[in-house]
Image (cartoon, grey):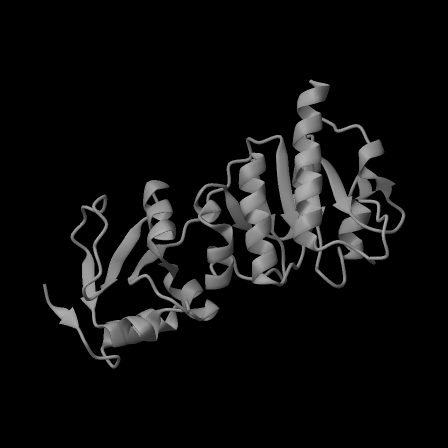
Amino acid sequence: MDMITSVQNEKVKAWRKLHKRKERLKSKLFIVEGYHLVEEAWKSNWEIKELIVMDQTDIPSWYKESNITVVSKQVFQSISKTETPQGILAIVKMKQTFIQNGKHLLLIDAVQDPGNLGTIIRTADAAGLGGIILGEGTVDVFNDKVIRATQGSLFHIPIKESLLVEEINTLKNNGYHIWASALEEAQDYQEVNVPEKVALLLGNEGAGINQKYIEQADLSVKIPIYGKAESLNVGVAASILMYYIVQNTHINK
C-alpha cells in the first residue's frame, strides 16, 4: 500500500479544506477523528468515503473496506485537529435524516459554542429525544469541536438544520407543545404538567431565545436560581429540562 508523505499532495490539501464550513457544505463531506468516533460513524451506517491512517497505526479489525489511505506522521498532523492524535480519521459523507416520530424534540436557536452544542446533542441522545432542529446562527454541527463533544451521539440522533419559524408552526400543527426556556415571564418548570408531545426550545448563550420564537411558543419555562448566579449554562439547563420532560411524560401516561 502506497503512503502519502507530502503535505502538498492534492488529496491532503482537499482534506485540510474540510476544516472550513464552506468546503464542508460544498463537498457534503466532513472529518471524524479518533478510534471511538470513527467506529461510531461506521456502526451507525454513515458512509465513510476514506479512512486515513497514520503510518505504523493499527487499522481497526472491524473495518473491512479497501478505501484506506496511509499517510506519514507529518501529513497526518497537518490534517489532525487534536493535541494528541490517535492516528486515525475518516472522511464521512453528510446526511440529514429527520424522522419526526418522537414525542420529545429539541429546537436550538443560535447556540454558538461548539462545546455547548455537542453536550446538548449528547444529552438529547442519552435522554432518548426523537430529534434536534438547529436554527439560524447555530454553530455548524460538523465542526470538529462539536463532533468531539458529542462523543458519537451525532451519529445516533436525527438532526437537521432549518428555519425555526417554519418548523415551530409545523410542529404545533402536528400536536406538539412548544416550551421555551426563558428567564422572564416564565413558569417554574417543576410546576408545569408535561403534555404528551413537547418540543423544547433553547436559545443563545448570551442573548437567549429570539423574541419572535418566544411569541410562537405555547409556554415559557424557567429553572429557579437559588444562589447568586444570574443563569445556568445552556447545556446544563438543557439537561435538566430534557430529563424532566421525558421522565414526567412517562409518569403522566
Q: Nearer the viewer, residue 78 or 105?
A: 78
Inspect this view and state whether residue 169 appears: no
**Residue in front for this viewpoint, 99 or 47:** 47
Identify the residue at image location x=84%, y=51%: 183
Q: Is residue 15 above or below residue 166?
A: below
Q: Residue 17 occupies which quadrant of the picture?
A: bottom left
Residue drawn where x is 40% and y is 53% of the image: 94
Taking the image as shown, residue 97 lies to the left or right of residue 12, namely: right
Q: Quadrant of residue 10?
A: bottom left
Residue 232, placed above or below residue 222 = below
* Residue at left offset 62%, top offset 39%: 105
Seen as rendered, the residue at the extreme bottom is: 8
Q: Position of residue 154 (x, y in %)?
A: 47, 48
**Residue 6 appears left or right of 102:** left
Residue at 54% x, 38% y is 126
**Badge count:** 0
Q: Quadrant of the N terminus?
A: bottom left
31 vs 17: above or below: above
* Residue projecting furthest to the top: 253
* The C terminus sits in image quarter: top right
Residue 89 in picture, x, y percent from top left = 31, 60
Residue situated furthest right in the rendering: 185
Q: Position of residue 73 (x, y in %)?
A: 25, 72
Would residue 113 appear left or right of 77 to someone viewing this image?
A: right
* Relative image position of residue 147 (x, y in whole percent): 47, 56
Q: Is residue 229 or residue 156 the one in the foreground?
A: 229
Give the residue at the far left of this rendering: 1
Tell me if residue 82 can be seen. yes
